[in-house]
Amino acid sequence: MPRRLAAGALAALLSATALSASAAEYFDRIASFPITANLPADADPKGETVAEIISASEDGRLLVYTDSPRKALGFIDIADAAQPKAAGMLALGGEPTSVKVVGGRAFVAVNTSESFTKPGGKLVLVDLADRSIAAECPLPGQPDSVSANAGVLAIAIENERDEKLNDGALPQLPAGALVLGTLDGDRLDCAGLKTVAVTGLAAVASEDPEPEFVDVSEDGKVVVTLQEDNHVLVVDGRSGKVEGHFPAGAVDLKAIDTKRDGKIELTGSMDKVAREPDAVHWIDNSRFVTANEGDWKGGSRGFTIFNRDGSVAYESGASLEHEIVALGHYPDKRNKKGVEIEGVEVGTFGRDRLIFVGSERGSVVGVYRDTGTAPELVQVLPTGLGPEGLLAIPGRNLFVATSETDLHGDGGVAPHVMIYERAERPAPAYPTIRAAKDGKGLPIAWGALSGLAADRSQAGRLYAVTDSVYSAAPRILTIDATAKPATIVAETLVTRNGAAAEKLDLEGIAVASDGGFWLASEGNPEKGLKNLLIRTDRNGVIVEEIPLPAGLEEGAKNYGYEGVTVTGSGADETVWLAVQREWADDPKGFVKLLAYKPADKSWGAVRYPLDKAGAGWIGLSEITAVGDRMIVIERDNQIAEKAKVKKLYAVAVADMKPVPLGGELPVVRKTELRDLLPDLKGSKGYVLDKVEGFAVDAAGNAFIVTDNDGVDDSSGETLFLNLGRL
């Protein structure tokens, strides 16, 4: 039976994530900059490039980021923050790991190591006025993080371990250290740098600390995370004295997903998980926040606020991860450390001190308001794939996030720097769809929405299906599209013989006349999946599975069923199926629209002409009968700036006259109904490639939804858009 949402649970969900009535300031994304736009003309266009750690000029008009694969520092002009411009790159003679701007200079930590056992590094001072190297200071090892405040410069010398050696076990010498310097404005005397030993402090591998991240407070104290040692230090930045140190501790996690099994089930638990913090940032002079990524044995999926003496002021536990599940950003295929919290930032905007928490694997940033006790979740921002650098620019009401995962060499998305602006708004633009809580108070898990259908009588009620990413638990999701954002309020497991119907790739859904559903499952010969037309009852129980006619399956390729819809009734009822791309018996540039009549179990088809592909391929992703028109989604498989074709086309139902298979098929005429690129660009992120669901509800409003691939080589961002009446 479908699981429904209780009214009380919905109220609790909304109250838990909404701003208080007296506040209405949110961040919305205003720009997205692909860092490939910054590459020199003679650079390898497919070579790896990333935007990792980021800083800004004091006036907030120039962004400075590290690009370790290119061994360079990158610059972005954000004088107009909504229109960022490439501002070039500067070669550094090594791999930059961190950057901090002070005054008119950028202080860049650069790794020049020969090997893990012969680490080396330097601090490069860059004049921002002419983008030139002003000086270089030798460092006693491989640096990882640099910070500055109150005239104190701090550098974490990690001397990272070789994770392939003995499964990354510690110790692996040489040991890391902390380097401190005194700044005179933005001037630094290299001879004045001093090294502070941090061995002999941690309970774990004390002879081999690997300082991961540093941050300097307004009173010149340096907080240092020793990630693998699961330890934290507080050091006086002027004297170098270790004023305090303590274990980062462990947490017990409940209601989490712990298996990579094609379904998200919040039924697992993990006890005594070491926090192993990565990034750290002072909130004020007495508290700091850690991002507990875990890089060895730990990773508690959350963040912790510590008092300066090491006592825990707040522990997030799995709460942010649950919110990420509700937003469809949970990465089931990369599940060991869950959403992997890696970055933190703090900034004061007006009267609000905000804490920004980045999820590397969920590709989001949680924005919290500091209350002095438990922080209040204000909103969650979508980022590029694998956010790493987080930067608050309060003077301009801006926040910036970088992404370090680069797929552009393989045709995927490049790393982006995304810019957000805080202003008074009725509500944040993202998410456009989320899940409510189930009867147990946990979010309905979802992702990879691959088909959409409308309830026949209730306006605003839609149904979606999840595709093969969740093949172990295929589901029909019920959506309340009248809510803001649209809300998944129920889930129905598709079952066969009393168990989850495995080995399905649901790509289309239509409402049957009896209240049940027609489902389209896409075939894939490489995975042993066949194209199936499936009929279920209203509770998701499979009543009938209808294979392709004999002989047709042999010519079917990986790109099969991508949508299903119904026309007519009684003896004239016809179930239409859209085939994504050409099969072996199709002329190039033409795909089949298959017609199945349940009354006599007969098959027929027409051919649909595709647009001509530029890069990649073009195919169909949905088919929906709306009155006297059949509407299809036609799209290319390109993403971001390469995306050219994301369109709705209409075909008159009167022209849909299928003939029996095996002979010449008639070609239908199509009329462009809507170019979806402007709609997809409206999010101010990069254009998402997979628009896969379309439906028109009982009130005549049209909706589209994108497929986020279950956060597999995807940022997880889903756009659910109300297009109004077409």
Image: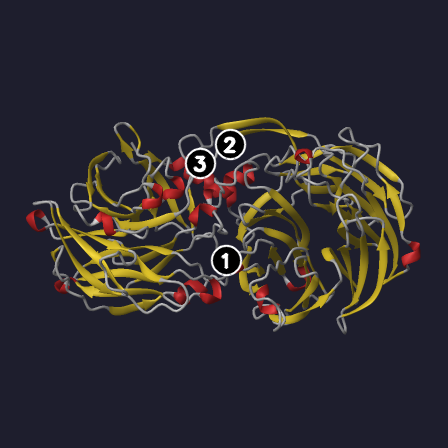
Label disc, if present, on residue 258 of the rendered structure: 2
Within 10 Å of disc 2 (Cα), the crowding (few <14, some 14-19, many 20+) is some
Residue 614 location (% of width, % of height): 39, 69
- Of the residues shown, which amino acid type is indicated by label 2? Thr
Q: CA distance from mark 1 to mark 2?
A: 30 Å
* Sequence-wise first label, 1 or 3: 3
Badge 1 is on which residue? 410
Residue 1 spot, x, y in % from top left? 29, 31
**Marks 1/3: CA–CA distance:** 28 Å
Q: Earlier in the sequence, mark 3 or mark 2?
A: 2
Amino acid at circle 1: Asp
Q: Is residue 676 left or right of residue 229?
A: left
Image disc number at residue 180 = none
| Amino acid type for the residue under numbered disc 3 | Ile
Work out whether residue 311 or residue 417 is closer to the camera in this orientation and state it. 417
User: Viewer-nearest of labels 1 and 3?
Assistant: 1
Q: Are marks 1 and 3 in contact (CB under 8 Å)?
A: no
- Residue 692 located left or right of residue 608: right
The residue located at (30%, 34%) in the rendering is 501
**Quarter location, residue 105:** bottom right
Which of the two marks, 1 or 2, is nearer to us in this view?
1
Give 661 or 494, whichever is nearer the viewer.
661
Q: CA distance from mark 3 to mark 2?
A: 9 Å
Q: Secondary structure at mark 2?
A: loop
Mark 3 element type: loop
Circle 1 residues within 10 Å: few <14, some 14–19, many ≥20: few
Above or below, 435 relative to 630:
above
| Residue, disc 3 | 264
Which comes before the other along the chain, label 1 or label 2?
Answer: 2
327 up-or-down from 37: above or below: above
Q: Residue furthest top?
A: 271
